[in-house]
Structure formats: C-alpha cells, structure tokens
Image: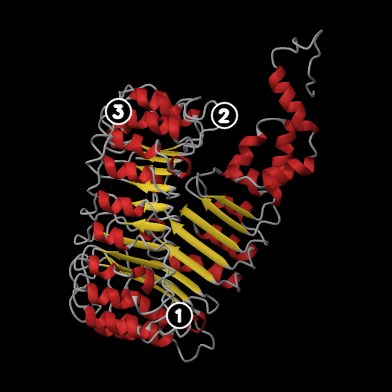
Amino acid sequence: MEKKPRAGADGDSRGEASGGSESGGLVERLPEALLVEVLGRLEVDDACSAAASCRALHGAASAAISAITTIDLSAFAPSNAILSRILAGNVSVRSVTVNCSLLDDSAASVIAKGSLRELSLLKCSFTMGFFVAIGERCGNLRSLKLEMAVAPEVLYSRSSRFSTFLEPIYAGCGYLETLWVKFPLLDPLTADYETRLPSVPGTVKELLLQPVSHLRAKTVFTKAPSLKKHVTDSLESLSLVLDTITDELVTLITSNVHKLVELCLEDEPVTQPNLPEDLTNIGLQALGLCHNLRHLSLTRRYCDFRRVNDFGILMLADGCKQLRTIRFGGFSKVSDAGYAALLHSGKDLKKFEVSNGLCLSDLACLDLDKAAPNITEVRLLNCALLTSDTAISLAPCTNLKVLDLSGCKSIADSGLVSISQLPKLTLLDLAGADITDAGLSALGNGRCLISSLCLRGCRRIGSNGIASLLCGTGTINKTLVSLDIGNVPRISCRAVTVISKNCEQISSLCLRNCLLITDSSLEVLGSMGRDSGKCSLKMLDLAYCSKLSRNFLRLFEPPLFRGLRWLGVGKNVVQRRGCSPTVAELLERKPGLIICGNACDMGCRNKCHPDIRFVQ
C-alpha cells in the first residue's frame, strides 16, 4: 500500500517521518520522463543507489538503465544476479564493460545481445560455452577486449588451447575490428609467451596480444599467398607484449603492415638478449620507413636496449616526422642528441615519455615549447640526470596537462614554483622528488587545476606541507580528486584531518606506509561528506600503516566510509585472528567493497586476480 503523509492539527505536527514523506512525495509528483532523464545522466551504480530511495526513483531507474547504450561496470565486480538486473531488459545497449571476477559462463545469457558493438571483459575466466554464445548472438560486434584473470594453462588444457575458444568469435562476428587478448604477466620467468592464436581475422584494424613470443608473432604477420584478405591489409594499430623485441620482427611488421598508424611493442627479457634476438639500429631504421606512423611506443623492462644509440634514433626521427606520441623505455645508450632530434622532428608531437633514460639530461627539453608547441603530456620517469632546470624549461608549455617526473630525485622546490604556474595542468607526479613544504606552499598558491597529485616517497615533506597545499589561495583544494602521499614518514593525523576538511571531493587517497596514521584520523576521514549526505572517497590505500589498531576495520562499518569501493591493507591484517569485525564480516555488511591484502597499487590496476572481491 502506498504511504501517504499524515496531516497534523497544525503546521508543526506532521509526524515523525515527515521529512522522508515530504521528500518522497515531492519526487513522486515529478514527471516520470524528467526522473528518467536525470537518472539516465548518472553512472549505473549511482542510478542503482537512487533506486533504493523510493518507488518513483526505482521505476525511473529501471527505465533509465534499460535505455542506456553504454554501460561500464569495471569499478566493481557484479554477481550474475546483479548483472541480470542491469542488462536483462536492455535491448539497445551498444557498449558493455564488465569486471567478470564473480561471473560464470551463465552470464552469457544477459551479456550476449544482438545490439552489442563493443564488449570489454575484465578479470574473466570463461570457458568454451561462453564464447560460443557470444559468437552466435553478437553478429554485429566490432570490438572485443578480453583481459583474462589467470594464465592460459590454468584455464585450458594442452588438448584444448585458448586458440580454439576464439574460433566461435571469429566465425560469428564477421565485422570485428578491434581484438584485445591479455593474459596476466605476474612473473616473467613463468609467463607463457607461446599462447597459440588462430589466424587473426582480416577485418581487424586494432590488435593487442599479451603475452606472445616473437616467433609466434611472426606467424601472425606472414601472409600466405592463398589468402585473399589478411590482417596485414587492414591493420592500423598494433600492440604486442613480447619475450623479446627483435630486428627481424620489426622489419617484418613494417614491410607487411602498410596502413600502420600506431605501434606499441613491449618486452620483458629476464636476461640481456644476444644477437640476432635483439633490437638494434637496424630495427629503428626499418621503423623510419613507416612515414604514416603517428604513435610509437618501444619499452623494455628489467633489461635495456644496449644496441640502440643516437644513430638509430636519428634515422627514426628523419623518417617519422608526423609522430604525435613517443614512448621510449630502457634506451640506456641514447643521449640528449637523440631525444632532441625526436622532439624537433615535427610540430605535431603531443605526448612524450621516456623511462629509465640514463643519458637524458636537462638539455633535451630546452625550447620544448617551440619544438612542440602543442605538447600536452610529458612523462620523464627515473631519469637520474634531470634537475629542476627541466621543470623550469617546461614552464612556457602552457598547453601541458600531464607532467610525470616520478623517480627524478633532483627535482627541488625551484622546479615546483615553475610548475605551479602551468594553467592547464591536471596531473602531476613527483614521486621521490627532493621537494619540501615550501614547494607545496607554492603549488597551493599556484594557478594549476590539478586533479591528480602523487607525492609518494617525498621524504622531506610533512603534514605542514599538506596544510599549505590545501589551505592556500589557489584552486587545488577544489579540483584535487586523487592524492598519493604514501611512503612519507612525516605524514601524521593532522594531514588526514586537513584533507577531510578541505578536500571533500577527493575520491582516491593513498596513505601506504604512513607510520603515524592512527584510528582517530580514519574516523575523521570516514565521516567526510556526512553533512552533505555524499562521500566521494572511492579508494583508500592503508597498506603497512602499522600504528592502526588491531580492530581498525570497525571504522569501515556503516555509516562510515559510504561509497568506498576499494580498500588496500597489508597481508598481516588479512591473516589476523580474533579481530572484530573480520574481513569476511565487513565484506558481508558492505557487498560493494573490495579489500586487497596483496599490496597492489590503487585499485589492483596493475595486477590480475581470479577473485577481486577479496584479494589475499
């Protein structure tokens, strides 16, 4: 029976629940079309939260969700039942992204729809039946992105390789243009680079394979004379995570893939490769023949490209003059001359990244605003020779939106003063920099509209610096949504209190290894946004905060930390016995929460886990 507001004798006596009745009655008097329009503009999880408020919003939310064409469920792991409620009545959805940690093959009954054009399945471990259903019902699918939760040998036997599971997709989805297949790379020593793949459909324009051996990759790009249409005829974007990048593979790609616009190659050799199984100046010369190349990424982890020097980079820069994105990692023999040649090779460059550039110094970035006037993103990671002069030289780049100088330990306060005047800067990473509280004060009074700030490992800053940052005359306290102050020994409860009071819109906060954080500061943080009725904090990292009490998890019980989706704690917390509440009890009371005891980075974004609901 529908509840009606009780009328009192006078204006002051309306019943105990007058506020709730009044607000519910007001909502129910609004036109349903208006409610559907409003809820349709929200994220799916926010619309579901609103649906629990009253009958009018429940009906409007159902109508709004059934008409949504793009659904992103990557922020949390829905169960089969929740996914069915969201997708079952929707016949017009075109793009779906799902965290599949809690799903099984039966989820195909609601995911597989004829209207689908884009499907992204994250942390999945489906078997043959699921892929058969997708191939049969999603004939108009254009994009398929698979991020598997575990290695292929865990899911599939040797007699039933993963390659056979993709065949129904290839057979039923004749218009497939984007194909991503990613298996986790948890340990390069045990990674299966020999993952077998059938011939990639000739319609594919964007291809990502992780991992794949350079020998297996060569079979993908070798065109058989009998084939009328091959993937090399249409491919425009290629990303491979390999065991080793070699000259032979690069030459094969550049000579056969004529429409290539984007190339991303990454390898993780455990030991330094020997010739001919390595990349040298010859491979860079072959890349220089790709005159249409716009985006280039070449990175090596654990080892370096010792056989590439400035000569190879100069040949690349001479041939590729339309590059808009450059991402290099592990080029230990390339100096300022090579990097400067790339930066000055064309005026279209927008993104420039170098990691582990042992010979990169401040000279490379001189006059960057003139060489690349449209540059919006600069990432110089773990480049030991860089100083504050680099930050000062970037000050004239007024279009700069992203600046990552993490691992550059000689960046000091003078550089931060220059950075603070960049008017469009939204992301700043200074992890490990030699800055102090004075530098944070300059940033707090600056012009930047920073939404993401990383100060991890900046050991000379403290709580006073955080106060200067968020209580200054600038706008950062209104724009900041992500803050990382992990591994900073002088961060205390005062810093957390300042964040709670001056930065209510923050959604991601890392306090990892802050040894002065106590329960009292968490209680203040958990109460953030209580007056407004909305807590924006979604992710919180407390790994290795050793001063928290044994029962600190009680602070995460309702009503504190409303809306929290991800909580990072150390393994010692997960393994404790006799705590109240236990991890399992807290998860039962907060079904939308993920607790990670595996010391992952925020959101477990760099690791795959079979069960992301409770990672341990």
Please state which of residues 122 and 303 is positioned toward the viewer in this rendering: 303
The residue wearing badge 3 is 576
Tell me the quadrant of the picture where the C terminus can be found. Answer: top left
Please state which of residues 337 and 520 is positioned toward the viewer in this rendering: 337
Answer with the quarter of the image where residue 171 lies. bottom right
Give the Cα separation between the discs numbered 2 and 3: 33 Å
Q: Residues within 10 Å of mark 1 (few under 14, many from 20)?
A: many
Tell me the quadrant of the picture where the N terminus can be found. Answer: top right
The residue wearing badge 1 is 260
Q: Which element carries disc 3, helix, strand or loop? A: loop
User: Residue 397's spot in the image, x, y percent?
Assistant: 39, 63
The residue wearing badge 2 is 533
Q: Which element carries disc 2, helix, strand or loop? A: loop
- Which of the marked residues, 1 or 3, is nearer the chain's N terminus? 1
Which dot, 2 or 1, sits closer to the camera? 2
Q: Are marks 1 and 3 in contact (CB under 8 Å)?
A: no
